[in-house]
Amino acid sequence: MKAGNLKGALLEYIVRQLLKSCGFTNVKADNLFSFERGGLFFINGRGAAHDADIIMNPPIQMPFAYPSQLLFECKAYGSTTSLPIVRNALGLRNDINEFEIVTRDSLRKRQNNRRATYAIDTRTRFLYQVGVASVNEFSKPSVEYATNNKIPLLSLSWFLSSHTINAFNSIDQTLINSFNPEDVQNLYDFFKDRKGNFHNETYRKTRDFLRSNNILGNIVTEANETIRYSYVGLLETGDIVFLFAQSEDNILNHLNGFATLKAEIHWSSDRPDVWTLTIYNSRNRVQRSDFDFYVPKRIFNHWKTYNLDKNAALNIKQEFFSRIFVFNQQNNLEIPFSIINIDREWLEQIRNNENG
């Protein structure tokens, strides 16, 4: 087993677990436009069938639009993810979105204005969004390209500790060769299994392996624990934030129905890149919870051009964080996401105090 293959499978496993915790579900192959071979999932495009590292259905579909599906290309490289990787994602998105079956028979039917049937295939068509997931950060050109072409980016470094990221990057062939080959193969199969049933007897060796004191087991343990206490938030700008709760006993985990949620955002000068989102029910301000999150790098860099000025921070809160869509975890499937609005009265009060 090559170390690169196992690292790629581990990255896929973590990203898939994160999406599942937000209510995303596996796409089922229709065995024509998409199919599975050798444990891999393929989706047809204009030029070829593409291996989809991760392909999932979102927890909710938007009306008046074709249903969407999300693909993530996973790149477990030991360095910054560069522009060509992100550029390839755009090519993949175009290829699968523009794919259509056109036969000679369908072309002949177009010549008959009185034809009884349409010259199109009867099937469900999807809008595919393609993103790139990596272990480490993305280069500035790749971030600019992704932003301008609306390509979602996801890095493990945004929500896992630097210690875990360093451990992930340290996985090499010498380490893999030190393990029992059968254990490694069973671990690889588990990471690639889209169902991810940890208690399946097939993965008994994997359970024992991950519970032992080794780098791979430690990475999986921290990733699963972090996902357990985190929520994925989507800004209206398309940026992703990870909200980290201090415990499972928080307001997002106890929603019994749709609630009007508001929030305040605070930060301190000792860690200006980590902000705290205080969420509360507007009808019951006593019910409130704090969630820490890293400010998306492009937004933080924008703030740095103002030398981390307090008034500039208020403008950023209003411009970028006025509304956050938070995907709820699997234990709240009836409510796929919550909408959190920044408390405008609180924001104006803070602004007046700063200018007073």
Image: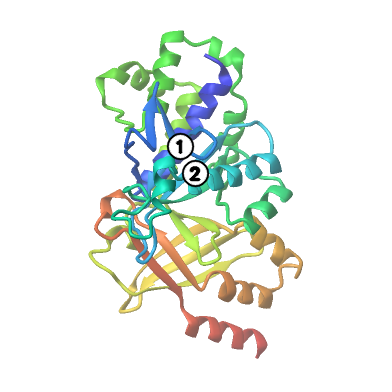
* Residue 304 drawn above or below residue 16: below
Helix or strand or loop: what does disc 1 sit on?
A: strand
- Which badge, 1 or 2, comes first in the chain's sequence? 1
Residue count near mark 2 (Cα–Cα under 10 Å), binned few <14, some 14–19, many ≥20: many
Q: Where does the image place residue 242, in percent across and percent down from the top left?
A: 49, 54
Any part of residue 94 in sight? yes
Residue found 60% across the figure and 88% down from its top: 352
Q: Which mark is residue 44?
A: 1
Marks 1 & 2, CB-CB < 8 Å contact: yes
Q: CA distance from mark 1 to mark 2?
A: 6 Å
Residue found 47% across the figure and 43% down from its top: 71
Query: Quadrant of the image for the C terminus?
Result: bottom right
Any part of residue 137 in sight? no
Residue nearest the viewer, comparing 252 with 51: 51
Q: Amino acid at mark 2?
A: Ile
Helix or strand or loop: what does disc 2 sit on?
A: helix
Q: Which mark is residue 170?
A: none
In the current view of this chain or complex, which residue is farthest to the bottom? Answer: 356
* Residue 153 drawn above or below residue 262: above
Residue found 42% across the figure and 69% down from its top: 340
Q: Which mark is residue 96?
A: 2
* Residue 309 drawn above or below residue 52: below
